[in-house]
Image (cartoon, grey):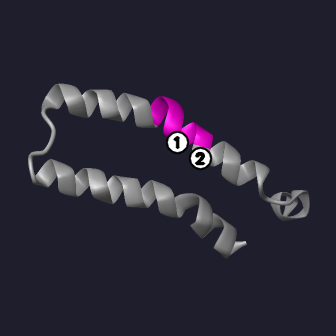
């Protein structure tokens, strides 16, 4: 079970780390940052969680 949680959450943490380091390097201004945040929270994160949940077996979800 721990391995499936890691598989689902690792891309999210990877993108967060990339965003953090891009922000520290001043690669985006405030309007670009708000647009990227909206994209991630409205589309990418729910899609990632859906794919992770749908690829997990029913028995594992019921545990």
Measuring from the top left, give residue 35's x and y in whole percent.
30, 27
Left or right: 11, with 16 as reference point? right
Which residue appears at 20% of the width and 57% of the height?
A: 21
Q: Residues within 10 Å of mark 1 (few under 14, many from 20)?
A: some
| Res 48 label | 2
Q: Which secondary structure is most common in the magenta stretch?
A: helix
Is label 1 in contact with label 2 (beta carbons under 8 Å)? yes
Measuring from the top left, give residue 49's x and y in whole percent.
62, 47
The quarter of the picture where the C terminus appears is: bottom right
Q: Which residue lies furthest to the right in this view?
A: 59
Check disc 2 and report its element: helix, strand or loop. Answer: helix
Measuring from the top left, give residue 47's x and y in whole percent.
60, 40
The quarter of the picture where the N terminus appears is: bottom right
Magenta range is 41-47
Q: Total number of numbered labels?
A: 2
Q: Mark 1 points at which residue?
A: 45
| Res 23 label | none
Which residue appears at 32% of the width and 34% of the height?
A: 36
Q: Is residue 27 magenta?
A: no
Q: How crowded is mark 2: few (under 14 residues within 10 Å), some or many (20 or more)?
A: some
Left or right: 49, with 21 as reference point? right
């Amino acid at each position: 079970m721990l391995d499936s949680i890691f598989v689902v959450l690792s891309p999210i943490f990877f993108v967060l780390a990339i965003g953090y380091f891009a922000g520290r390097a001043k690669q985006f201004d405030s309007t670009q940052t708000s647009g990227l945040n909206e994209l991630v929270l409205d589309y990418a994160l729910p899609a990632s969680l859906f794919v992770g949940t749908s690829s997990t077996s029913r028995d594992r979800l019921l545990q």
